[in-house]
Image (cartoon, grey):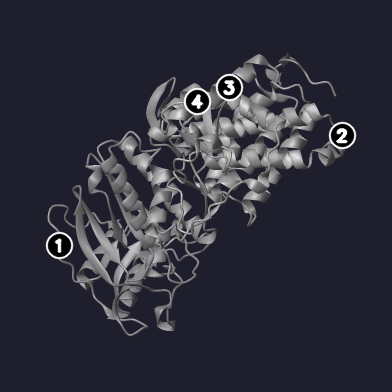
Amino acid sequence: MTQLAGRLDRPSAGSHLQVDCLENPAIRTRIQVFRDLLASCQGPHGKAKVVQNSLGGHVTWTKSSIRLLSAMPISTPVLKLIASAVQGHLQKFKDGGLFTANVCLSLLDSSLKTDVHRKLLIEFYERFVNIVDDYLGSSKCACKFKIDVFNLQNVMAVLKSLCRPKLSHMRSEVQDKLCVLFLDVFLSTIPSERHDYFSDRVQMQCFPNSDILESRCLKGLLVECPELSSVTEKSLHVPSVPSQQGCVKIKVALVLESMSGDSEGLVDATYETKHEVDVGNAVVERMLSLCQQLVHCGVGLLLCQRVIHPRVKVFLRQAGLLFVDRLGSAGVPYIRDLTGAAPLSVLTVNMEEGWSGFGWLDGVTHQILCDKSYLHLTQENAPVVTLVLKSSLEETLEEVKALSHTSTNTLQLLLGDPHVLPGGGCWLSHVAAYLTAKIQEDKSSLLNEFECTESQLNASLDTFTYCLLSVAMRLTSDLSIVTSDIVSMDTEHYHIWRCPNTNVSNMHSKTCSCNCELHWLAESDKFEYVSVREASGQWTKQHIDWTKVATVSEEDAFPRVVDALAVMRNALKMAVATANTVLSISQYIHDGD
C-alpha cells in the first residue's frame, strides 16, 4: 500500500476531522521538538522545565518525566501515544521515563530519514531489541553486576546515580542528605517476612516554607489531629490492654463509614421505619452503643475515615477513648499496614460475638510540626514509615516527593532482581557494540531470513546503534562530550570515556575514566575517538571479535554510576515497541486544530 506523503483534509458536513501521517513535515518537526525537549532534561547536565498553560494557572517546575508528562498538554496523536506508553512504564517502574521517550523519539526521527521500508525496519528493530534483551538477561553478559542490597556502599551508588542528576540544582550537602534519607526509608520498609500490604509503606508529609535539611524519616505514621493543641505538646494517657502475644499494647478500631448520623452513607438499601422513629437519632444511638462496646473491649484509639457526630465525640472524651476523624481515604491503607486493623461496620458488627479485626500499636504520642498537631503512631517491627519532607519551595517539595517514590521503588525492585548495569551510557555503548558483533556473525542467515540486501541490514543497524549512542552521550557527566558529539571509546570493554582532551598521547598525564567510573587509565592504544554519527557505521565495516571483549575479573569491582537492570530492560523494550507501533500506523485521524 502506498503511504501518504502529507496531511489529507477531508472535510464533510459538520466534520472537522484531519488525517495526518508521519511524512508530514509538521508532524516530523513536532517529533524533533518533543525529542529535544525531553533530551535536554536527561543526564547530569539536564535542564529543568517550567510548564504553564496559555491561560495561566499552576506553574510546574520539574526535571522529572513523571511530573513533566502529566503537566504538559499534548494534543498531537503521535506524541500522545508515545507519552501514554512512557507513563505506562513509569506507573510500574517509576524510573527510566526520559530514557524510554528519548530512545523512542530518536529511533522514530532517524527511521524517517532512511530509505529502508518501514515494514523491514520494524522487523529489524524487533530482532535487534530481542538480541540485546537476551544478552542482558544471560549469565554471559559482560556489563551486568550483581548487587548486594545489604552492602550500603553499593546501595548508595544506586541512590546517587538516581538522585544527583535530578538534584543537580541543589547543594552537594542537600544531595547527600536526601540520599541518606532515602536509604533510611528503604531499610526501614524491608519486611521481616512475606506479607500482603495495602500501601507502599511510605507515607509522605510535606511542609513548605521550611529548611530542606530538616527532612527526616519517622518510624510509624503521623496522623493529623486538630482535636489536640497545636501550641504545646500534650502527654497522652491511652488505655492499653494485653495483646494476643501477651504484650501490653494499645488496641485500635478502624471505621471507614461515616459516624455523623447520616444513614444514607451507611446502608445502600430501601427500608421502612415507624412514623415516630427518627432515623438520624436511631443511627446515633447505634453508634453510641458501638462506642460503649469498644470501651468495654479495651479499645484505646478509634480511627474514622469520615466524620464523627458531636454527641459521639462527647461520649468518647468522657470515656477516655482517644479518637481521630476525617482521616481521608489516602491514609487508611497505611494505617491498616501499621496496625493490622480491619474495617468494622458501624451497623452490623457485634462485639459480643467477638471481633478479631482490631489493630495494635506500641505507642501513641502527640507531636507538633509546623504549627499543626499530629498523633505519632508506632508499632515495633512494622515496615511502615513517614517521610517528613520540608522545603522553602512548594515545587521543590513535589520534585523531592516524586524522587522519593522513584528511589524506594527502584531499591525494592533490586530485592527481586539484584542486578545493575554500568551507568553513564556505558552499558548502551557496550550493547551497541555487542549487537553489531552479533549481526556480523549472523549476517548470512539474517539476509536469507528477511530477504533483504546487505545495505538495508547495515542501514537499519546503523540507525539503531546510533540512537543508543546518542542517548548514551546525554548521560555522561563530561559536558564537552555532550556538546561536541565526539566520544572516546575503549575497544576492550566498549565503555564511553571522559577525558580532558582528544589527544591520545597526553591521556596518561590527566585523570581519565569511563563514565561509570569502573575503569581508570586504560592503555592509550585501546582507545578510539569517533563521532557518534560515524561510530555505528565504522563498526559495521570492521569486524568486532566479541570473544576478546574483557570482563570484570575483580570480585569487589563495582561501578560508581549504575542503572537498575530490570528498569532499563523494560524501558528499552517499551521504547522500541512504541517506535514500531508508530511506524506501523499509516494515518492518524483527529479533530482539526
From the viewer's perspective, is the residue at label 1 or at label 4 nearer? 4
Asked if marks 2 and 3 touch (Cβ < 8 Å), the reply is no
Residue sitting at x 55%, y 25%: 34
Q: What residue is disc 1 on?
A: 234
> Whole-Å distance between the Cαs marked 1 and 4?
52 Å
Residue sitting at x 50%, y 29%: 38
Q: What residue is disc 2 on?
A: 451
Q: Amino acid at mark 2?
A: Glu
Q: Amino acid at mark 4?
A: Leu
Query: Regarding mark 1 in the picture, which secondary structure is present there?
Result: loop
Residue sitting at x 71%, y 18%: 23
Q: What residue is disc 4 on?
A: 37
Residue 477 in the image: state x and y as whole percent.
42, 34
Q: What residue is disc 3 on?
A: 32
Give whichever of discs 3 and 1 has the lower sequence position.
Answer: 3
Q: Looking at the image, which is closer to me, 130 or 476?
A: 476
Say few, some or many: other residues with alpha carbon within 10 Å of mark 1 (under 14 / 14 to 19 / 20 or more). some
From the viewer's perspective, is the residue at label 1 or at label 2 nearer? 2
Q: Looking at the image, which is closer to me, 511 or 449?
A: 511
Say few, some or many: other residues with alpha carbon within 10 Å of mark 4 (under 14 / 14 to 19 / 20 or more). some
The quarter holding residue 384 reads bottom left
Give whichever of discs 2 and 3 has the lower sequence position.
Answer: 3
Q: Is residue 13 above or below residue 476?
A: above
* Res. 592 visible in picture: no
Horizontally, residue 434 falls left or right of residue 375, namely right
Residue 593 in the image: state x and y as whole percent.
60, 17
* Res. 139 visible in picture: yes
> Whole-Å distance between the Cαs marked 2 and 4?
38 Å
